[in-house]
Image: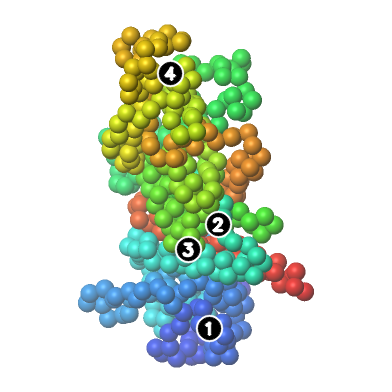
Amino acid sequence: MTSNPIITLFQWLPQFKPGQSARPLNQWSPARSKLPRSVRHCAVAMKYLDFLSPLAWDQLPQRSPPPHSVQPAISYAAFAAACLIKLDQQLVSMSALRDYLIEHPQLQWLVGFDPHQPLATARHLTRLLRAMPNAVLQILLDSTVHRLQAELKPLGITLGQAISLDTKHILAWVTENNPKAYISESRRLDKTRQPQGDRDCKLGCKRKRNRPPLQEQGQPLTPTKEPRPPTNFSPQDEFYWGYASGVVATKVPDWGEFVLAELTQTFDRDDLTYFFPLLTQVERRLGYKPACGAFDAAFDAFYVYDYFYQAGGFAAVPFVGRGGFKQRSFDEQGWPLCQAGFPMPLKSTYWSKSATLVEHEAGRYACPLLYPQPTGQTCPINHKNWPSGGCTTSMPTAVGARLRHQLDRHSDAYQKLYNQRTANERINAQAKALGIERPKLRNQQAIANRNTLIYILINLRALHRVRRKKAHLAA
């Protein structure tokens, strides 16, 4: 016969003194002798004490009790620890988590719940996931990065010298994402008709062409087999209602891949909107700018190259000739060369506020045969613009705008750095295994919090792998 969880709970209750609440988990590690005997003898409780103790539980803010409540509020630490256990145990719902905690009252007490009080309902736990500020969970993610830095520093490894950034699509839990639901395509893809199942999700496109151009992949520009129809919608693209999770990862050879920053936005946001918010997180956690970065073709923007140039490195990004602009050549002063091979002098500058996501200074470059003074020569290639005042061109004056064209994408250094993107692929695979792609939630805040918890768990598992390997090498 299986034991009744309620009876089991009351068998253990006398060992927990009323009002004896758990301290932060990381404070129990050096004081195990002060733990109740029942907790010390519970394998599940001790397992999670060891697993969760590296996190900075004592840095989390206190949660105020709800108005007119006679019971103390569930602390952020207790709830976050319970959610990490839920993810680690692959429990599919808050009801399953609640049953698991009832079956293990020692664990329930250890993470911070009062076993003398009825455990919160599954509905209340779900409400907490929606209401918890994401900044609280970011504190725990901070601590995983700091712990990894501390573990790797004695080995002479500086974490985050080379990073990669990618996004992972997340499908909203709505009828519009169900291909078997009877909905017309015009309604399914109408971004003005918000799904009733989720008032926060947005319609977006999962583009499969964020990759190097076909020429760089060694493929012909026009496929000789299975030609694609010339429509405005590529059959390779997929449209969903939902969200996307942007992740900055770093790879340490022989030690693993680690998450440095993460951000969840609605699916209609461009990939480039993740760049500065995520790199700001990375700088804050590492204490310095990463020197090198690897990205897919969606991040081919001058300010990406400029960021890593200012940090003393470079960015490995495939070139994309948007708007019909091909790669340019420059002279030693950084002036662009016209089609005839002459350097075009800077004529004027202006402040561009709409051309890209970032406001920047741009320059107008003029024909060197006519500016600053006419030389009396005629265009040697008889360019079509010569009768109307010669060639002119505009481009950002930042160094990154020039480096974007001059980067040697066939060099060994570029190829080696670009291969760092496998770190994101492995992190995304772990996140997918933890259910990030199809959450059964209907609120952006809840999904964002769940995503952060997933990445905390991924880093926490990686931290313990590092510690086990160090102990093995030291043995």
Q: CA distance from mark 3 to mark 4?
A: 48 Å
The structure residue drawn at horizontal position 30% and vertical position 31%, both measured from the top left corner, is 348
Q: Secondary structure at mark 3?
A: loop
Query: Above or below — where is 437 with respect to 54?
Result: above
Q: In which quarter of the view is residue 19 placed?
A: bottom left
Q: In which quarter of the view is residue 94 placed?
A: bottom left
Nearer the N terminus, badge 3 or badge 4?
4
Query: Above or below — where is 221 with respect to 32?
Result: above
Q: CA distance from mark 2 to mark 3?
A: 10 Å
Three-letter residue code for mark 4: Thr
Q: Secondary structure at mark 4?
A: loop
Residue that mark 1 sits on: 28
Is mark 4 in CB contact (under 8 Å) with mark 1? no
Three-letter residue code for mark 1: Trp
Is mark 4 in CB contact (under 8 Å) with mark 2? no
Q: Which mark is residue 249?
A: none
Q: Residues within 10 Å of mark 2 (few under 14, many from 20)?
A: many
Say which of marks 3 and 4 sits in front: 3
Residue that mark 2 sits on: 160
Nearer the N terminus, badge 2 or badge 3?
2
Residue 191: % across, % down: 31, 34
Q: Secondary structure at mark 1?
A: helix
The structure residue drawn at horizontal position 50% and vertical position 78%, both measured from the top left corner, is 25
Residue that mark 3 sits on: 287
Q: In which quarter of the view is residue 205 placed?
A: top left
Q: CA distance from mark 4 to mark 1?
A: 62 Å
Three-letter residue code for mark 2: Gly
